[in-house]
Image: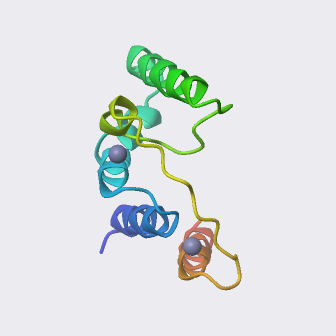
């Protein structure tokens, strides 16, 4: 497994852990990450996305969405309630600790 893949695995795992729908996790990994890494090249895309996400938050009477929701869910107003996990008890945090440790050791 390459390093990038491991982080991707973490994104999937923690996304599941937070209770996000599969479509949002997939969109985050397939689309959003790549765009967000190059904000200058994707300014229009990001602006459009933020506008529609903020619009949905506003419609639902919230300040912000709180996670990267996919366009399909924005369309259908499918906002999920996030689970918060207990840092010392949840596997996703252990996975993150491991990945960070590995990254720090390789610097
Ligand atoms: Zn979705
Ligand atoms: Zn967790």
Q: Classify residue 98 as left or right of residue 41.
A: right
The quarter of the image that holds ligand 2 is: bottom right
Q: Residue 101's image quarter?
A: bottom right
Q: Nearer the viewer, residue 58 or 45?
A: 58
Q: Nearer the viewer, residue 20 or 6?
A: 20
Residue shown at the point (48%, 42%) measured from the top left? 68
**Up-down relation of residue 93 to residue 44 (above or below):** below
Percent from the top left, x then y, of residue 34? 36, 39
**Up-down relation of residue 57 to residue 66 (above or below):** above
Q: Nearer the viewer, residue 73 or 14?
A: 73
Q: Classify residue 72 as left or right of residue 40.
A: left
Residue shown at the point (44%, 41%) measured from the top left? 69
Q: Which residue lies furthest to the front in this view?
A: 60
Percent from the top left, x then y, of residue 102? 55, 76
**Up-down relation of residue 32 to residue 3 (above or below):** above
**Up-down relation of residue 104 to residue 63 (above or below):** below
Percent from the top left, x then y, of residue 15? 46, 61
Q: Classify residue 63 as left or right of residue 19.
A: right
Position of the N terminus by quadrant: bottom left
């Amino acid at each position: 497994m390459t390093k990038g893949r491991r982080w991707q695995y973490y994104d999937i795992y923690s996304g599941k852990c937070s209770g996000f729908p599969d479509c949002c996790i997939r969109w985050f990994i397939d689309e959003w990450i790549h765009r967000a890494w190059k904000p200058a090249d994707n300014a229009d895309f990001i602006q459009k996305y933020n506008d529609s996400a903020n619009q949905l938050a506003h419609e639902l009477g919230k300040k912000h969405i709180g996670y990267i929701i996919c366009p399909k869910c924005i369309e259908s107003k499918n906002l999920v309630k996030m689970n918060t996990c207990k840092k010392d008890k949840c596997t996703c945090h252990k996975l993150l600790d491991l990945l960070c440790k590995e990254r720090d050791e390789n610097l």
